[in-house]
Image (tube, rainbow, N blue to C red):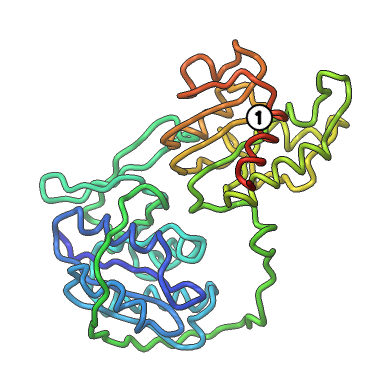
Amino acid sequence: MDKILVIVHTEADGGLGKAAFETVGAAKSLGAAFDLGIIGADVAAATNLLAGCGAASFFGVSGAAFGQSRYATDAAAMVALVKAAGAGIIIAPATSRLARVAAGAAQRLGGRADTQVTALEVKDGTPLATRWFYRQRMTGSLTRTGQKPWIITLAPGSFIPWQGAPGEATVTTVPVEAAARTEVVGIEAPSADQQTIRPDAEVLFVAGAGWTKKQADGAVKAQDASSLILGFLNACKASLGSSKSLVDLSGEGHSVLPFLTHLHQVGQTGATPRHPKGLATCCHGEEPHVVGWRFITERRAVNLDPNCGWARGKADVLYVADAFAVMKRVNELLTA
């Protein structure tokens, strides 16, 4: 089998994200030797976190220019690491930082790239990568023998993270000359309480269109819905999702929760999150929406209709109740 190189990058604090440990875990599961490459402003601390992972050699691209995500510098760093390691198979996490440069790096190296891989195995001495196609309704297995290097990016949440004690590792510094035409002057980001998309959250809370429809008393209670939903998110730091019907209601002249966007959309035309637990509220469990929940380990739903789609084997538990009353009581318990 070709030589394997794992490439990860540091986070803003100089450490490593969960996706980096998942990538190392995926590489170790192949049962073959591998090298490790790290990109960041200072890779020493991050390398020590992975010192015991079993990598044969450690390579690093470091410097102020590589502390920020930028196509020119990240692509050049990935190319330099591959050449330094002499690897034929490159495994990297499909984070926003590396996913956008994988194809460009493969083109510069004369290789190929396959993205969002959800499973890796070795068959007859050859790595086999599996990923979803057709809006995640069918899977395909891929292998490449004559097109090298082969860059594979792994979908976050698909692999068991490597766990091990930190240590001390010797890093081979790889020099990189990258002409950066852009300058990162700062980052504008919402506060922790305003951030409602949290990929690493334990719970995914999905709001359906019922939150902004007329309630039993004939009134629309969008303001109450906003308070209940945001109260739950802030109390347990859950991630927020929505059904397509909810984010599109503005085009139909209906009330819309102001903090929901198309980025929150979960389903066939939206995201496919991988949280351990999921709670759907005021959703009916239609197939286009539920398809986005296929990787949620435990699924629960709250709906007044006992015959909704969730009741037909799509949820582990269905609570036939008013979501307003349920979430009000849940928030009371969380803040007690």
What element does badge 1 sit on?
helix
In this view of the protein, which residue sits in the foreground, 302 or 28?
302
In this view of the protein, which residue sits in the foreground, 19 or 277?
277
Q: How many marks?
A: 1
Picture layout, residue 110 above or below residue 335: below
**Residue 220 point in image, percent of width and height:** 86, 29
Number of other residues with Cα within 10 Å of mark 1, as a class: few under 14, some 14 to 19, many 20 or more: some
Q: Residue at x 27, y 55 (%)?
A: 26
Q: Residue at x 38, y 56 (%)?
A: 153
**Residue 23 point in image, percent of width and height:** 32, 59
In the image as oriented, which residue stretches furthest toward the front? 336
Q: Residue at x 56, y 53 (%)?
A: 198
In this view of the protein, which residue sits in the foreground, 330 or 302?
330
The image quadrant where one finds the N terminus is bottom left
**Residue 158 point in image, percent of width and height:** 36, 47
In the image as oriented, which residue stretches furthest toward the left? 124
Q: Is residue 199 left or right of residue 42?
A: right
Q: Amino acid at mark 1?
A: Val
Q: Which residue is mark 1?
A: 326
**Residue 319 point in image, percent of width and height:** 57, 21
